[in-house]
Amino acid sequence: MAYNVAVDVGGTFTDVLVFNEETGELTEGKVLSTPEDPSRGVVTGIESVCEKVGIGFTDLHLLFHGTTVVTNMILTNTGSRVGLLTTKGHEQVLLLARAWTPGPLYGWMALQKPDPPADPTDTIGVAERIGADGSVLLELDEDGVREAVKTLVERGVESVAIGFLNSYVNPAHERRAREILRELYPDLSVSISADIGQEYGEYERTLTTVVNTAVQPRTMLYMRNFESSMDEKRFGGRLSIVRSDGGAMSTQAVADRPIQIALSGPSGGVTGSAYLAREIGVPDVLTFDMGGTSTDVSLCLGGETPVRRDIQLGYFHFKSPAVDVHSVGAGGGSIAFLSASGALQVGPASAGADPGPAAYGRGGEAPTVTDANVVLHRIPPGVALGGTLELDEEAARRAVSTVAEGLGMGVEEAAEAILEIVNENMHAALRVVSVERGHDPREFGLVAFGGAGPMHANALGRLIRSRSVIVPPTPGVMSAFGFLSSDIQNEFPETYLRNAEDTPASELKETVEGLISQANEWLDGEGVSEANKRFDLYADCRYYLQNIQIPCRFELDELAGEDSTFLRARFEEAHRQRYNFELPDSPLEIATVRVVGRGTIKGVSLVESENGAGEESAVLRTEQVYFNGAWRETPIYDRGLLRPDHAVEGPAVVVQDDTTTVIEPGYKGAVDRFGNILIEEA
Amino acid sequence: MVLHEREQGLPDFVREHDIDHVTLDIIENALKNIRHEMDRVLVTTAVSPVIREQADEFPLIADRQGRMVVGQFGSPVDTVLEHSPYSVEDLKDGDVIALNDPYMMEGSTSHLPDILLVRPIFYDGEHIGYALQWGNLMDVGGSTAGSIPIDARSIYEEGVRMPPVKLYDAGRLNEEVLRFFCHNSRTPRETRADVMAIAAGTAAGAQRVKDICDRFGKDTYLEACDALLDRTRTSIIGLIHQLIPEGQTFEFEDYTDDDGLGNGPIKLKLSMWREGDILHLDWTGTDAQVPGPVNFLLNHRMFQMFAGVFLISAVDPTILFNDGYSDVIKVNIPEGSVLRPEEPAPLSNRLVVMARLFDVLGAVYAKAIGFNVSGSYGTSPNFVYSGVKKDGEPFQTMEILYGGIPAIPGKDGLDGHSWWPEFLAVPAEYMETYYPMIVAEYSARKDSCGAGQFRGGCGIKKVYRFLTDGRITYQDDRHHTFPYGVAGGKPGAASRKTLVREGGEEVELPSKVRDVPVFEGDRLVFETAGAGGVGDPLEREPEAVARDVRWGLVSAEAAADEYGVVLDGGAVDAAATEARREELKGARGELPGFDHGPLPPLEEQRRVVAETRRAFNEWLSGELGAQRTNGRR
């Protein structure tokens, strides 16, 4: 029998999900994360779930691992010490950043700008220059490179990044400089910016390269440790690391581009939702992932995971493909307060995991969203979070009463107000990815997951007026579920910057074929067989001089005409949908050409569960739960006992180990044949 | 009569409101989000780099009476209508009024390149408000590329003036007027695209307001607008009482270099006092309008916003900015002053006076609130290079550069960052891809930061190499004056430009020039001003000074002379530093509250300003003459 396993390491818990290829059964488990050496938690977690299933490591076929190793290093600036070589005259590229300060007026007063990830002391300019057209304006000063790297190594840098201007057009100088470094210091780890980013924008490309370099040594160490602990357990299957864009790749590929796994974890929920959406026949969905401090939302069209080309982590913006999620500082731990004008605000400040909400009883006093849910019994009395954490309702009431006083309301009323405000913030986030981009949410399902997602899902579905709300069977480990559905994947872009009108399709084809062969080579390296390979082709277009890039997908056999204007109709349709106007006189610029290479390795499939549990009721008990200004007698259901023909009338609360699903009055939940709860208006 | 200058009685929105607290808070949030959405639509679809890469644009939502409910700069709707042939009754769903003439909106946008679009919002046939947005266009004609001729003598030289016209009439684009307008621009295609993008921004804003009405009902929305104005008004009254003592007048004055025609320095003077609930701000004592285009037609309401936003940012940034408090901040701007010039005074280069206005406002607050808010900002000049590429295509760049961000108590200023919210520097690789130039250097300008316990930010040094013959125009300031330091902090360095001809000849250029001929291979060394420091430099953490030296921001000499920090091989020599600091302390007098730098007497300054311009003009005539006779130098 073959089993696949996915492991998602989070800040507090490490989630594990095992899939039985034969029966389709999913088994989940959670263990505490071990931040000092995350791989320990991973091994323990896999062990404990294997035990539950009654198998050993040798029975595991595919292993998918999502890790925050890179994220944490970036956020805490604990990567290795990187030396940076730049083009002379541009040494302060990271210090000057792009001059950005936040709004509103006087926003600069509040900006806490972190130091550049490569210390300016460790940055040296080298005489060389490539023009924007790729021509060599000034030959590389090779002796200068030698001197610079010697100085840097003497100063104690552990690795070196090279970021020369316009190298994305012509990487010759960066490559030559790397060669020189390798001759001098064969063991020194070196990255060049042309390998990391293929777009103009020296700040973002240099930053991405430096961060990639900084996290490399410790990421590689982690990967080696992880592999050897898997070897020890005699795991003999395929080990894949989950990328920020929802794909997966080998640990060897991670060693080259650790930056590509910076958002490894959050991608899983979206990939999983897109997969689920495809399988259950609701291909267009909004995803809603509400955790402790933030909520991530995204929009999946046609069952595809949406991908963007840049990511933000703390202050820094990087260039790296990642699942296109929009984040808002609203979660279970978000703190409610009154502004000086008396307006009720919730978040973005969060009580975090420690001390956490007042209801955790760990000394938190500020009223949080979780406290409001506890006050209203949306988390029913007697339910322990994660099966272990008892909640202190009195502490929650005390916390919420602080804002209730300011608002001149009762505690329940204030708790409901807190929920309304936080729901509104998340509603706004959902609008950003749907309405603002020209999509009507009424045509979309809403997939809800994360620790707090199912509790707020019904409200969000009501506010955004989505089709139906889908709460998957394992909402607490949705990321791990998504990992199991990942393809081996990487993307190969090239900055193009040519007008479609002046570009013979044959020339575009040449570029595309070059990228396909790169992608093909990479997939070969990942051991993907010919039959499982797929290449998706994109031209990212815009009107000449615009700042957007709208991906226009095409097939190779379309590249036949005298020009490339066939892209225009595709672009304009999307532009019109989003912005409601077009510019017929403006040339169409092909900004980037991209090939995404995929290798399918099916890690999971949905299995229909048998109908009905007969007469057995899934109702555990009833409790008083507060809805719309009144306490109401409300049945509490056990998720584990719900079967496909069950229907749950709202108001109702469905409990399971790691989350609680709320069904509001006037709504009903139906259980589908895959075990999802679908919430719709009654 | 304009709505916001009602002298008697309370505004109509000050009353009990029939709306529940949570609904109001939700609508407040939704309105804030609308503003951000309008921003995003415009920034992504515009083509001009000033909007696209630098986000120079601002949206707002106004209520039925044209009062800003959410936004940043105060609403000009009433004055726009006043200067138009339309009354509110003439407006239809789908109309968009466009204008760029600052005199027809009392300075709400204050020079011709900023175009304002006003879209009335209708719900079920009833007029319920306005969505507005303005953006900085690349060129609107006039006598120089970029439409900021620094030596203009009247607004007629500064570009095409569009009075309030219906750009859209009931949803139909007035193609003729747009074609006419764009035809007057040197960048017609970009101008058209940007105007369309701004219109799309207002459409998004209007649609979202309708969505709110769908959800909560029109009447609730309208009640919410009133309640939000009221709530902000009450908060501002509270802040005024909390922060500004009564019975004292606080004053500050500072200078702008010159008007581009040799007149300067130009004084801005502000007095502030509180009388009960009312905060008075008075510009009496400010210099008269000048012949050159640095006149800044200051809209009353916009200045009320600036004044209120400062209080809000200092105390609680979550308070919504809106026009609710326009009756409690009273503003006097003397007619005929540089802040209230008479039509047709030229206005294009008002940025330099606007920047000084923020310095003066900040300093007055610093005195009133009793803590030193910050030093003075460096400069944020525009820079334009235009000509014809070798393949025959005309080109024109437009870029905003940044100076040092001031120090504030407890925090150093940022080096070469934008004082303006959300602006970005343009990547060298972008400029080089689309325009015939090389950015040979982009760095923080060493020793330009004002010393202090917390130092000001450094200005930047940017070196351009031109790849084809063309012309350059820029508008900078702080060449003859310095960004002041406070509470013992030193001023930042003055700005500086040097043109280096291919043959090696170096020419110092003044702070504002237009259409200076440049040739292939020439270089322009552009140095913006640094920012003022806060507190005694001898109190600065020696390790911080050592780091600044390592990072190339402060020289070892300046470390020893300004900060009294002696370094030995890059490390702080503690004993020598202590001795040096004692020595410096003994040699100096009392530290001034404000340090404006080593300025000569005013008469001498005036002479220097005039002489600099005269000498430059003479040089420029020679260059233009040589260009005519020799073709290329």
Image (spheres, rainbow, N blue to C red):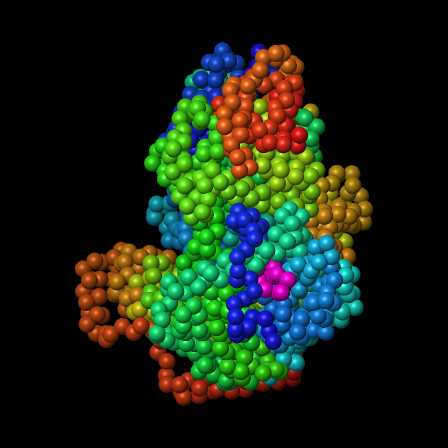
Residue in the foreground of this view, choosing between B263 and B117: B117
Is B619 situated above or below A37? below
Q: Is residue A460 visible?
A: yes
Residue range highlighted in magenta: B60-69
Q: Nearer the viewer, residue A73 or A344?
A: A344
Q: Position of residue B88 (x, y in %)?
A: 70, 67
Is residue B184 one of those drawn in magenta? no
Lateral position of residue B563 relative to residue A346, left or right:
left
In this view, the residue in front, B433 or B67, is B67
Tell me which residue sits at (35%, 63%) in the image.
B455
Residue A434: image x %, image y %?
A: 65, 43
Q: Quadrant of the N terminus of chain A?
A: top right
Which residue is rendered at x = 28% and y = 66% of the image?
Answer: B536
Does the magenta segment cover residue B65? Answer: yes
A627 lies above or below A208:
above
* Position of residue A460 measured from the top left corner of the image (x, y, whole percent): 59, 38
Q: Quadrant of the C terminus of chain A?
A: top right
